[in-house]
Image: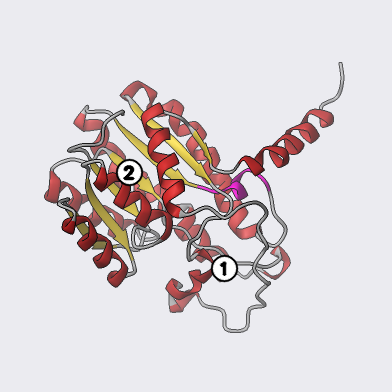
């Protein structure tokens, strides 16, 4: 997909951070945008910004961990614009702390958003996108934490590794349909991911849980706009991996060197 004008893009987690930047970037390129989030004021601000610039946007309150709500999001997208060409499964949350201290509610919440949110997006949107026979592109937001394990981020790591593996398979499965796939693996970005608890459902809160300190990130901190520009370039190039930071190269090399060294020599 090399042009975005008159295409329809759905962005979950679209009220802030990378999602907001993606929505605004698509709109600047002439795409119509569907925003999904739990932050109603944030979505309203993004939608109004797009409309003020002459674009079209619809905001739909959506909990991506609930398949019914994601199916309703898809229905509203087709009602509003008659098609969807780009799906960005971007919504994400994080908890910090060692796996020995992680609670069942931690696992339920983070897996529900980070992994089931992506799966629900595929279940609700893919059949319709395929049926359109117009091609398209799926963007799944993972993390460098989906490629390199980090102490203190075990629950988050688990979900993001799964999203990477899902995306690596999805690109093969969707090739016959002319639908591309990109998996976004950033390091530090100026987002509110460390404030994820603000949207944690009360039923999944653990008042007595032991929380670890936020894990310090290596490398630069990019703006969401810089990351969004890389994503749009990857869609145009039909590029699977979107690895935003050159600082990730050495940890990746080290990981695969350890794997190579573990293989018995013939």
Q: Residues within 10 Å of mark 1 (few under 14, many from 20)?
A: many
Q: Is residue 107 above or below residue 77?
A: below
Q: How many marks?
A: 2
Q: Position of residue 116 (x, y in %)?
A: 44, 53
Figure coloring: secondary structure
Secondary-structure class at tag 2: strand
Camera-side residue of 161 and 9: 9
> Residue at horizontal 33%, vertical 69%?
39
Q: Position of residue 204 (x, y in %)?
A: 49, 74
Q: Is residue 154 above or below residue 254?
A: below
Secondary-structure class at tag 1: helix
Question: Which mark, residue 251?
Answer: none
Q: Nearer the viewer, mark 2 or mark 1?
A: 2
Q: Which residue is mark 2?
A: 87
Residue 99 is covered by the magenta coloring: no
> Residue at horizontal 32%, vertical 47%?
25
**Tags 2 and 1 in contact by the CB under 8 Å rule?**
no
The quadrant of the image that shows the N terminus is: top left
Q: Which residue is mark 1?
A: 106
Q: Which residues are magenta?
A: 142-148
């Amino acid at each position: 997909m090399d042009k975005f004008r008159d295409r329809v893009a759905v962005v979950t987690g679209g009220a802030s951070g990378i999602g907001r930047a993606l929505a605004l970037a698509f709109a600047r390129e002439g795409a119509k945008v569907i925003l999904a989030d739990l932050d109603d004021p944030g979505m309203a601000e993004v939608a109004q910004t797009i409309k003020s610039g002459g674009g079209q946007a619809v905001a739909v309150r959506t909990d991506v961990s609930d398949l019914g709500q994601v199916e309703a999001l898809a229905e509203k997208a087709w009602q509003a614009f008659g098609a969807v060409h780009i799906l960005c499964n971007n919504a994400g949350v994080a908890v910090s702390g060692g796996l020995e201290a992680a609670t069942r509610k931690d696992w339920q919440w983070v897996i529900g958003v980070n992994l089931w949110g992506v799966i629900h997006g595929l279940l609700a949107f893919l059949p319709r996108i395929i049926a359109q026979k117009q091609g398209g592109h799926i963007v799944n937001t993972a993390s460098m934490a989906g490629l390199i394990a980090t102490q203190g981020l075990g629950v988050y790591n688990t979900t993001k590794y799964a999203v990477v593996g899902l995306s690596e398979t999805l690109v093969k499965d969707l090739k016959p349909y002319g639908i591309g796939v990109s998996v976004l693996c950033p390091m530090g970005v100026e987002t509110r991911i460390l404030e994820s608890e603000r949207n944690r459902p009360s039923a999944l809160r653990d008042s007595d849980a032991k929380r670890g300190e936020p894990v310090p990130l290596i490398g630069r901190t990019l703006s969401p706009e810089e990351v969004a520009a890389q994503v749009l370039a990857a869609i145009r190039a039909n590029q699977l991996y979107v690895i935003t930071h050159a600082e990730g190269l050495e940890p990746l090399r080290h990981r695969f060197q350890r794997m190579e060294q573990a293989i018995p020599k013939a």
